[in-house]
Amino acid sequence: MKPLTLVLALISAFVLSANASDTFKVDPVHSFVLFSVQHLGIANTYGRFNDISGTVVFDKDNPSKSSVELSVQVESLDTHNSIRDRSVKSPDFFDAKQFPTMTFKSTKVEGSGDMLKVSGDLTIHGVTKPLTVDFRKGGEGKGVFGEMRGGGETHFTIRRSDFGMNFQQGAVGDEVNITLSLEGIKK
């Protein structure tokens, strides 16, 4: 191999290995924030948020260089009942007018393979609390238009009282179970 060809090959290998992270823009059509909460201690009430956006940077060789930044619009809350939706968006619960957005910004990513532990700051109702979740990375593949996609999912529980939402404690459970399923398009 000629010296110049060898040098170019080494530089290319270095550049490619130095850029091992992939950036994905969250696809709101294929991503979900689902929740359930006890009602009167009888059964769970379910809902979702229909407007999620954000960016996930994933470095498979060095997960500590990965990051997550998500934003959810509170007005997009949907419990399949417009009266309940208005109540939950009101100042009694989310106060969507004063606090229109929920956010998560990672501060640390650990793990390997398909299981990652993602820690960060979750802000709801103007209150920021630390949160650590186990995130199971899904697959990667081409979408219908040839775009590269990737994703994964996590399940976790928060206490709404930790975020200042104390209205109707007892009638409405304090623990809220959340499923976050993300699919993103590689930039």
Image (spheres, rainbow, N blue to C red):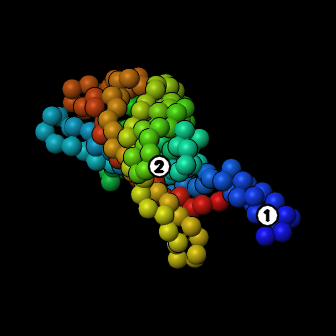
* Apparent side of residue 144 relative to residue 135 in the rendered image (left or right): right
Mark linked to residue 76: 2
Mark 2 vs mark 1, foreground winner is 1
Do we see residue 106 in this rendering? yes
The amino acid on which the numbered mark 2 sits, given as a three-letter code, is: Ser
Task: Name the residue at 39% across, 37% down.
Answer: 133
Task: Locate residue 107: give its quadrant.
Answer: top right
The residue to which callout 1 is attached is: 6
Q: Residue furthest right?
A: 4
Do we see residue 31 in this rendering? no
The amino acid on which the numbered mark 1 sits, given as a three-letter code, is: Leu
Task: Locate residue 65: give its quadrant.
Answer: top right
Task: Name the residue at 26% across, 25% down.
Answer: 169
Secondary structure under tag 1 reads helix
Task: Name the residue at 68% across, 50% down.
Answer: 18
Tell me the distance, in whole angstroms, between the alpha carbons under discs 2 and 1: 55 Å
Disc 1 residue crowd, few under 14, some 14–19, many 20+, Cα 10 Å: few
| Residue 177 position within the rendered picture, expressed as x and y whole percent measured from the top left | 30, 40
* Apparent side of residue 106 relative to residue 23 in the rendered image (left or right): left
| Residue 102 position within the rendered picture, expressed as x and y whole percent measured from the top left | 50, 37
Vertical arrangement, residue 19 with respect to residue 74, above or below: below
Vertical arrangement, residue 40 with respect to residue 45, above or below: above
Disc 2 residue crowd, few under 14, some 14–19, many 20+, Cα 10 Å: some
Vertical arrangement, residue 124 with respect to residue 50, above or below: above
